[in-house]
Amino acid sequence: MKKKLGIIERLTKGIVLGAEGYVFELERRGYIKAGPYVPEVVLDAPNAVSELSFEFLRSGAEVVVALTYYANRNKLKDVGRENDLEKLNRQAVRIANKVAQKGNALVAGNICNTWMYNPKKKKESGEVVRKIYREQLQWAFEEGIDFVISETNDYLEEALIALQEIKRLGLPAMITLATIQKNTTADGYDYVTACKILEKNGADIVGLNCDRGPATMLPLLKKIRKAVKCFVAAQPVPYQTTPKEFTFESLKKNGQRIFPLGLEPFFLTRFQMAEFARKAKAIGINYIGSCCGTNPSITRAMAEALGRVVPASKYSPVLDLHPIIGKKIKSNNKNFINDWRDE
Ligand SMILES: [Zn+2]
């Protein structure tokens, strides 16, 4: 059997397409409670996790991310399931492995901000965070992962603990920052500087995920790409963020905050996300994906925008066969998809 290429080898050869937002999508499907957003679904309805992971895979995702986001000691306590901690973490990685085998995909272990880090108590809180990461990563490592994604990091210093714990296991590390503030992490590092520090400390891939839509993430990505030599990752949310409301958390409709359950009025089309994939490629981003709010139709559109034909491409749109708009397309000789895209 041919040996599976690792994340570094794949990124050296070209762009790797990712897909995330499992928690958001499974909430929409009725398997995760909005608010705590703890992935109890891994134990309660494992098939739902397998199915979504497989849908992303056949839509072109090359990495299956184990659903251990928020599956840490602290968050499980919130929903009274701290006794399920190890079982849940192990099961999530097993599910990811089973799905990844159906394609030529990699399995990523997943850790995230813990909400336990306190920059005023660096040492004590840092130890708590380290313990959380160490146990999650050890279980994932034992079940079998190809690399680790540490994501939505508000604090650089918390991200550095994650990085150390990933490197302790000798695995490639992808560390992405949350960008909820305008220019700096919650501990006051400029985002670009923070990425440089992560690179210097051994991160293989640095970048941004979540919070921002393409419009407000791309300008930052350009600066990061120029500042570091390592691989850069970008996984925005598929929402129309603006310079004034630059994160999806800050979006307002009629003066009201609509995060996280009323975001649909700002939802981007698959064509707009495909456009993001093209733009990210053009500025030299290596790992391109999408985060909260995304779905497999977006992943397929992004894959196809990168020139790929994926299993789900078998059912890609052929709108000239539509009984009503098909006739219009033929008579005007216009490609409706391209018209949409260029809006
Ligand atoms: Zn997200």
Image (tube, rainbow, N blue to C red):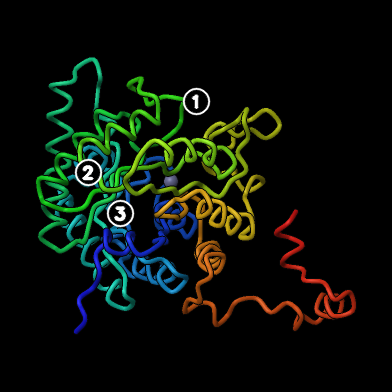
Q: Are marks 3 and 2 in contact (CB under 8 Å)?
A: no
Q: What's the CA distance linking mark 3 and mark 1?
A: 33 Å
Residue at 44% across, 70% down: 55
Q: Residues within 10 Å of mark 1 (few under 14, many from 20)?
A: few
Tell us which disc is closer to us: 3 or 1.
1
Q: How many marks?
A: 3
Q: Which structural element holds mark 3?
A: loop
- Tell me residue 60's x, y (percent): 44, 69
Q: Residue furthest right?
A: 331
- Tell me residue 72's x, y (percent): 22, 43
Which amino acid type is shown beneath numbered disc 1?
Lys
Give the residue at mark 3.
40
Q: What's the CA distance linking mark 1 and mark 2?
A: 28 Å
Q: Which structural element holds mark 2?
A: loop
Residue at 44% across, 48% down: 234
Query: In the figure, is residue 140 to the left or right of 305?
Result: left
Tell us which disc is closer to us: 1 or 2.
1
In this view, the residue in front, 169 or 126, is: 169
- Specify the label residue 72 is tagged with: 2
Mark 3 and mark 2 lie on one chain; the one further toward the N terminus is 3
Quarter containing the N terminus: bottom left
Tell us which disc is closer to us: 3 or 2.
2
Which amino acid type is shown beneath numbered disc 3?
Glu
- Specify the label residue 182 is tagged with: 1
Residue at 23% across, 39% down: 77
- Tell me residue 205's x, y (percent): 31, 47
Q: Is residue 159 above or below residue 337?
A: above
Q: From the Cβ of disc 2, is ligand 1 less than 8 Å away?
A: no
Q: Which structural element holds mark 1?
A: loop
Q: Are marks 3 and 1 in contact (CB under 8 Å)?
A: no
Q: Residue furthest top?
A: 120
Which amino acid type is shown beneath numbered disc 2?
Asn
